[in-house]
Amino acid sequence: MSEEFYIKLSDVMKEMSFDIALMPKNPNDVKIKSRNINRMGLELIGSLEHFDNTRIIIMGESENHFLSTLTSEEIYKSVEAVLSLSPPVLIITHSIKPRKEIIAVAEKYNIPIILSKDTSSEVTNELTPFLNLHLAPRITRSGGLMNIHGEGILLVGESGVGKSETAIELLKRGHKLVSDDLVEIRKIPKNTLVGSAPENVRHFIEVRGIGIINARRIFGIGAVKLTETIDMVVNLGVWQANKEYDRMGAECVYTEILGVKVPYIDIPVRPGRNLAIIIEVAAMNNRQRKMGYSAARELFINLGMPSPNSENEKIEKCIWDI
């Protein structure tokens, strides 16, 4: 993706308890663009061939012990070789007081230094999931996202097909709304997709003929969520008489979002169909499929017919890809 994501150093400092040793520039202006973290280890002996200056650098007891074996001039040169490459920030752990040579180099190259009482491993373990979430690849797409029987269901379809009305009916039936109209989708490690609503439109729903409503205020705090994993995509499309719709569910159909395959179903919309109930059943059926059960396969076996080939998968384009 061409868009570059970053998080401000000030946001990182709010998330964790850091003390400031040196802050030569406004932390709001320091952009962190990498989800990875570097230990200042081999770099101190000049191994800089694969150094990534977009990463946060952490210095702990091992690095501090190594520097204690050097002269003041050697410490300055060793640290300068790293900090001259302009990493966004240096974190010193174990409550280690930064050496005067490190402070001098950081001042020269305007590199912030922050301190932590925790160990290097603890800082890394706490910081990594935070960076993974905020710097994950993402897209924003039209649609609605709901938690239905524990499954994250992404509702897509053409404008005016009834996505918002269906979401309201599902809310009345006790399910939870994450977003209506726009969904921010992030890909986090282990190929998991997480959806959320843009903050400025969170929990608002547009209903034609009524206008804008606030789902949180009408249905209560228990009816909304901030984020949800995306387990299935449901496309609501206007019924077409000349189109063949899947009536058996024998084949697994998927769509791809950010390179991740997600189960996909196409539900035709026409008067008289209760979409909320259909989507509820689709969510429960999707959970059964994940647990290894297929009703279509069982029916074929009961009828003495060859079992559907579970490997016969199709990739379906989502509404935004058409």
Image: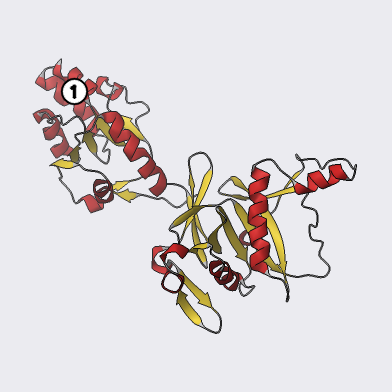
Residue at (51%, 67%) from the top-left corner? 180
- Drawn side of residue 275 relative to residue 216, left or right: right
Kindly give the residue lying farthest to the bottom in the view shown.
209
Q: In this view, does 185 lie above or below 52?
A: below
Residue 194 visible, this angle: yes
Which quarter of the rendering shows the C terminus? bottom right
Q: Where is residue 73 in the image (x, y as percent from the top left)?
A: 11, 21
Q: Is mark 1 on a helix, strand or loop?
A: helix
Residue at (32%, 38%) from the top-left corner? 126
Q: Nearest the camera: 276 or 89?
A: 276
Which residue is identified by label 1? 64
Residue 53 visible, this angle: no
Neighbours of disc 1 within 10 Å: few (<14), some (14-19), many (20+): some
Q: Nearest the camera: 222 or 257?
A: 222
Colouring of the image: secondary structure
Q: Where is residue 26 in the image (x, y as percent from the top left)?
A: 19, 51
Residue at (15%, 45%) from the top-left corner? 24
Count of residue discs: 1
Q: Nearest the camera: 275 or 54?
A: 275
- Drawn side of residue 183 relative to residue 72, left or right: right
Q: Position of residue 21 (x, y in %)?
A: 13, 39
Q: Position of residue 192 (x, y in %)?
A: 52, 44
- Drawn side of residue 295 relative to residue 168, left or right: right
Kindly give the residue lying farthest to the right in the view shown.
304
Residue at (60%, 62%) from the top-left corner? 155
Q: In this view, does 4 lie above or below 179?
A: above
Residue 307 occupies which quadrant of the picture?
top right
Which amino acid type is shown beneath numbered disc 1?
Asn
Q: In this view, does 134 lie above or below 181?
A: above
